[in-house]
Amino acid sequence: MKSREQRDLFPGALEMMILRTLKRQPLHGYALAQHIKRTSNDLLQIEEGSLYPALQRLLKEELAKAEWSISSTNRRVRTYKLTAKGAKHLEHEVSRFEKMLEGITRVLAPGES
Amino acid sequence: MSWIKRLFSRRRIYCELSEEIREHLEEKIEELVAGGMSRKEATYAARREFGNVTLVEEDSRTVWRWPSVENLLMDIRYSVRMLRKSPGFTIVAVLTLALGIGANTAIFSCINAWIINPLPYPQSDRLMVFATHDKKNGWTGEHVTSPADFFDFQKQNTSFEQSVAWTGASLNLTGDGSPELVDGGRVTWNFFDTLGAKPILGRTFTPDDDRSGSPHVVILSEGLWQGRYDGDPKIIGRNVTIGGEAYTVVGVMPGTFQFPLMGIANLWTPLALTDKQRADRGGSWLPAFGRLKPGVAQEQAEAEAGVFFSGLEKQFPQTNANLTWLVNSMTWDIRRKEGAPELMIVFVTVGLILLIACANVANLVLARATSRTREFAVRGALGATEGRLARQLLTESVLLFFLGGVGGTLFGFWGMKLIESWIPSRIRGYMINYGHVDLDFMTLAFTLGIALLCGLIFGLAPAFENTRLDVNRTLKEASGQASGSKRGARLRQIFVAGEIALAVVVLISTTLLVKSFIISVRTGPGFNPANVMTAQLALPRPKYINDSQRRNFGEEVLARLRALPGVASVGAASNIPFGGFGQGVVVEAVRRPAQPGERTGAEFWAASPGYFSTMQIGLVKGRLFNFADSQGSSPVVIISQSFAREFWPDEDPIGRQIRFGEQHTVSTIVGVVGDIMRNHLRERGSWQIYVPLTQFPSSTLAFVVRSSADPTMIATAIRDAIWSVDHDQPLSLAPLETLIAVVDAGYRVVTKLMVFFGTLAMFLGTFGIYGVMAHLVSQRIHEIGIRVALGASSVQVMRMVIGSGLQLAVVGIAVGIFVALGATRSLATLLYQVAPNDPLTFVAVPILFVAVAMAACYLPARRAMQVDPIVALRYE
């Protein structure tokens, strides 16, 4: 059986990355996928498809909104944009994540007692 | 409400999603093609990068849903489609379940109406009935006590709020139309108040009404008020004539009021015992009950009664030696009378039937699932998880059981009405709500509850069985002839063996009951009820005040009856077996001095000379009464065989004397007759004595008329003959056979039900064997083909199939016999002259089952024999 969630990521991580990317500039699905791949230097094994359920969740929670438009390559695309609520959520999530990371790093750091 | 908007805009969201994903893939492909890949390669690469498109879409859509509810709806829709696709399977399964569940619904609705529902009185759990119990001889006089004991206890006890005494009575209602014998009761003044019953008109009785010599008052039932008095609004205060005396109506009770211990009652008068009657301590004949004070337990009350009665024992050793009171819950007592134990046996039986039906259906589901392995494998390969598949299968089976539950409700409703119609109207008065049963919320909840529960339990096995499959192996198997897992086959065999075991238990129980029924019918009641018409009546006291008036009435009627055309013989007695009256007396043999406190009860009849020949009660020894045994001659008595055997085991009883009754009359034994059954058809010989009616004129009389043809033909003639002697005399006419049938109704109902359920169990068991064997053969066609190709003869093939079927049957039967040996012990009270481990039954039923199992295997075996190896192997 295939796992439905990306095992490599913790729940909410993908959403956080999407929100962070969208904060910089509105993007459509494909561009979003490429951007995350590129910036992570392909370190994260993310199926492109797994982006879509996450995007739907963001839409449902009204953290992002979407609009159809024509792209520079003359393609009909659906562009996602961060909402005010999304921006606030991102801030909150990022600080939570940083705290968590700090905690994990301290535990993992060698030599200190 | 945004979620409602969402619900309607979902289709658009899904479309956008699909389009978006399509565009995503297109963009990627184009980019890859621009980078120098061929279009085909690019498509592959894009898809690989993207992942499972269907799954992604589905997951994305799930975000917008309530997954559990919607999956369920989807599963149900799919299940309906699957069930419709195989109508044969669905119909058989639903019918099987409808039978099993319906049987339970019908029986449960009866149990609910008669046993679970509380008595129709406020705080009925505080109502207790009294019984007189002889500690030394072990007999118990149910409900009854002596008046003196009762009134003493009523005055002195601290446990009961109220104590009530009552007697049932058939009262002669005359005036305002034709004379009518109305069933009713004489009750102490607090009867209605203690039960918590309120009149719809007027009042209940007062202590003043209940004094001997007070003006006569009466309370009517709503039915009698509406029927006989046309609902006269001025009924209160009106005078009616009962037993020739004027009574003033003081109240009307609602139609819903009933007192099952009294039977049907439409008329109540105060008990108003005379001082002499109140002082009677010797005879236990007064029925009584009480209402406990709040917070007092049954045990406390019984303990108090025990202490009180040991006091009476010392005070009145002559009458009260060894006597005490038992205090029983009225609810328990009424339920026992309604046949609660018998009903519970039937309930257990239908429970077993339901298990058999469920096992059958589970087997069908398993068998069908085996042929659906490919479907599951394909769905597994497409990404369905094990849990998802199991849930789908479970939904299918629950849906199936639900349909069975709906069918069962219909079937059960019909069965319930049928059972209700079997209850003779005469015994309805003794049942709560007059034996009326309805399909109420409780019954419906029960039915759907068991349907869903069974669906879950019996659906789980196939669900787990079939979702653990090896996708690769199944899809690779050549023709979809997946042979099903070994464990699946094993499970089916266990189900079949189990259901055969259950069917054997049910059928053995049924056979025992039927055998005992046949024996009791064949033994007969000790007299011949065919072609005998009975007329029972009670002579009103003021009109027939002395013995000679009663004697004259009886002789006059007998003479007129004898003169009727078509009459073979006539007789009269103070009461008749299975009739409305019954008398008992205390007897002792004169040969030995009476031990104080020792009493022997005997059933008692005052009978005319023609009574024995009309009833065809056989003379064993001595003589019957004749016309010389008259008023002035020396008292004589005829005793029953069991009585003679008990008192004079090695001697000739003729010429010996016994003393009996309140008057301690001494009579000489002149004859011995066969035992008869007085109250029901499965009595063990009781002691019975007969005295001449001329010497003991009775105010209750029953005339028996044997005619040469259908006794109902002369019913009118008999009535007219009696009315020609006294035109105001009410009476009740019935063929003797009807009286017996009415009394025996409960047993007949149980026997009928058990025969039906026994047959059903066998049918379902057989069907189970057939289903499994047929499936087994179709699964093994290939193997059988090889065997035949290798030279197996058709006889060998048949032996193989029938052998494996029989193996299952024999295991099931063996287990069944073992279980039945223990289970049938609970039937002992219902059996008459048949032991619960009756050897013949325990041999015959298993043999029958082996035969039936072989028959069930025959069709599949024949199919196996006809397997053409070429055809079978071609599908390789």
Image (cartoon, coloured by chain):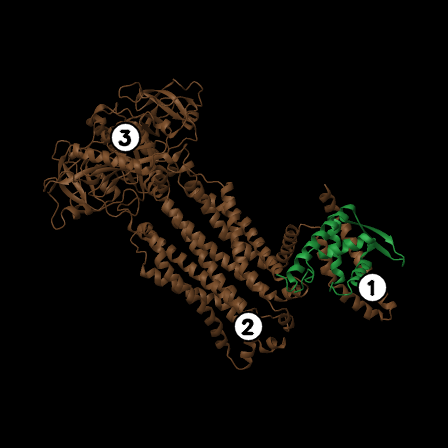
Chain colours: A green, B brown
Residue under the point 45% across and 47% down: B107
| Front: mark 1 or 2 | 1
Q: Are marks 1 and 3 on the same chain?
A: yes
Identify residue type, mark 3.
Asn
| Front: mark 1 or 3 | 1
Location of the C terminus of chain B (image quadrant): bottom right
Location of the N terminus of chain B (image quadrant): top right
Sequence-wise first label, 1 or 2 = 1
Sequence-wise first label, 3 or 2 = 3
Q: Secondary structure at mark 3?
A: loop
Q: Work out whether residue B676 or residue A2 is closer to the camera in this orientation and state it.
A: A2
Residue hosting label 2: B780
Task: Measure the alpha-carbon separation of dots 3 and 2.
Answer: 79 Å
Number of callouts in the render? 3
**Mark 1 touching mark 2, by CB under 8 A?**
no
Number of other residues with Cα within 10 Å of mark 1, as a class: few under 14, some 14 to 19, many 20 or more: many
Sequence-wise first label, 1 or 3 = 1
Q: Compared to B829, does B668 lie above or below?
A: above
Residue hosting label 1: B28
Residue under the point 28% across and 51% down: B523
